[in-house]
Image (cartoon, rainbow, N blue to C red):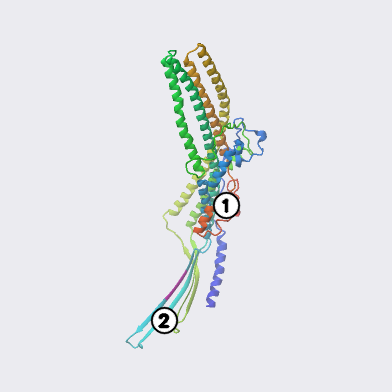
Amino acid sequence: MFLIFNCFNRRLLVLYAALALSACNTLGPEYQEPQVEWLKKWQPDFYGQLDLEQANADLDLRFWWKLLEDPVLDRLIGIAREKNIDLRIAGLRILESRALLGIAGSSLYPQVQQLDASLSAVESQRRGGNLPSDDQSYIGYQGGFNLGWELDFWGRFKRGIESADANFFNSIANQQNVQILLSSQVAQLYYVYRVTEQRIVIARENANLQKRSFEITEQTYAQGQESELDLQQAKSQYLGTLATIPSLQIALIQTRNALAALLARPPGPIPELTPSDKVLPTISLVVLNDIPASLLMRRPDVRAAAWQVAAQSAQIGIAEADFYPSVSLLGSIGWSGASEDSIPDTGVASVGPGLTWNLFDHGKIANNVRLQDARLQQLIEQYQNSVLSAAREIDDAAIGVVQSLEQSGILTQAVVATERALTLANKRYREGYSDFQRVLDAQRALFVQTEREVINQGDHISSAINLYKALGGGWLDTTIEQAVPIDLHDTMAARSDWGDLLDAALPLNSDEPPPNTSAMQNER
């Protein structure tokens, strides 16, 4: 038995030598970051609104909403970061990709490890012939261990780890992108709510104003001093303005419910949304802590697209490995015996190479390589499109900020003019210099202009939010405790054995695009 195991150990040395040799062969292309040629010359100034002198100001783009100076908004975004379900799912996907990375890493070790054992009771009977008649019973037992290890001669398993590694970092970038979307969605809904509140106030104020005019015309008509036409026009305008309020109330409740969903709350009142008469903020200059092109390339969704390219690049090497033979080391150790002394114990150990090679695949392997290459090129094009879309979002939001700010000044003057026109129309009507239609026209114009002014203020804030979202603001490096909150952690730990995956720290993900393959492995 000693000689058998000694021989087996010598053959293990051959195994390790083969493993060392296999590390020298890795098929497939090394990952190269896709180049965006036009980005080198793209230096927007946000249509004159970028404050270049303060380009390096102390602005933390991760908390861009602080520029709006609204503590209620700060509180709502904080709650959403703790409770939002989409953000929790994104954190769980990090765990999923981490487990998949562990599965890929296990391929470097023996793939077949099988222990067989059996115990049997045997009874034999011999009758007739020249042998003595006898009954014999004994217990037989045997055990064995089989081992199969495919050597990574062509880098199939190494490329699989690279692909899983890239997908792991992709999941982190996606979680950061959900943070960006969540912050912007909460801010957008919050200010839609505030704008709708103000529109309801404006509608009620104008309805009250028009109601007084209607009551006056009603009295004068009863006295025979006004025509029925003036009465009906005043009534129609008053009721028309009053009719806008229910639709605004519907929009207000729907916006509140959408915001509650982001906070992981059921539909209903949000205590933080107390009525506010605070003036809506204005963004006059865009202050950044870096140039827009650099911020664009650090957007998590752009980096996620690059990680997808890196993951698919490794798939080509995995496919190409099928062109070559699969070399495995196969071994087994077995032992059998019985309780009967006349039956000898037996021990067997064997180890040797095995080779499989699909020589006649009828083009299946070649077409699989082509398939993976086509998918890689698609992802490269999608990456280019992601960068283009990000640049377009930045430019669209920037022009929205500029033009809505310009329009705001015009609308403010228009409101002042309509207020003055209404005052003059009322005065001329009372003095008998103009008819009641001029008063109705002035009231209608005031309602339209004041509502347009508030709507434009909301559009201005929305454009500013979209701009900072497009620049990639609003995400933080995630700790494992933030990605998987304690309640989820405890539930999953009680249900399954996660080892250290639920507690191991997440890597600090760089803002830069994925490195080449060797650097990626070093980062892991």
- Between marks 2 and 1, how big is the CA–CA gap? 60 Å
Amino acid type, label 2 = Tyr
Where is residue 515 shown, x and y percent of the image? 59, 49
Q: Secondary structure at mark 2?
A: strand
> Residues in magenta?
115-119
Give the left or right position of residue 55, taking residue 204 as reference. Answer: right
Who's the residue at 52% across and 22% down the image?
446
Which residue is farthest left?
A: 128
Image side of residue 24 versus residue 220, left or right: right
Q: Residue at x 48, y 44 (%)?
A: 266
Q: Which residue is mark 2?
A: 138
Provide the major secondary structure of the magenta segment: strand
**Amino acid tagged 1:** Glu
Question: Which residue position is annotated with label 1?
Answer: 481
- Percent x, y of residue 229: 42, 16
Could you classify mark 2 by the number of other residues whose Cα lies within 10 Å: few (under 14), some (14-19), or many (20 or more)?
some
Q: Nearer the viewer, residue 121 or 302?
A: 121
Q: Verify whether residue 266 appears in magenta.
A: no
Picture coordinates of residue 509 (x, y %)?
Answer: 59, 49
Residues marked 2 and 1 touching at CB (< 8 Å)? no
Residue shown at the point (54%, 66%) measured from the top left: 15
Q: Is residue 109 above or below residue 173?
A: below
Q: Nearer the viewer, residue 376 or 307?
A: 307
Q: Nearer the viewer, residue 389 or 446?
A: 446
Is 119 located above or below residue 309 in the figure? Answer: below
**Which dot, 2 or 1, sits closer to the camera?**
1
356 or 68, nearer to the observer: 68
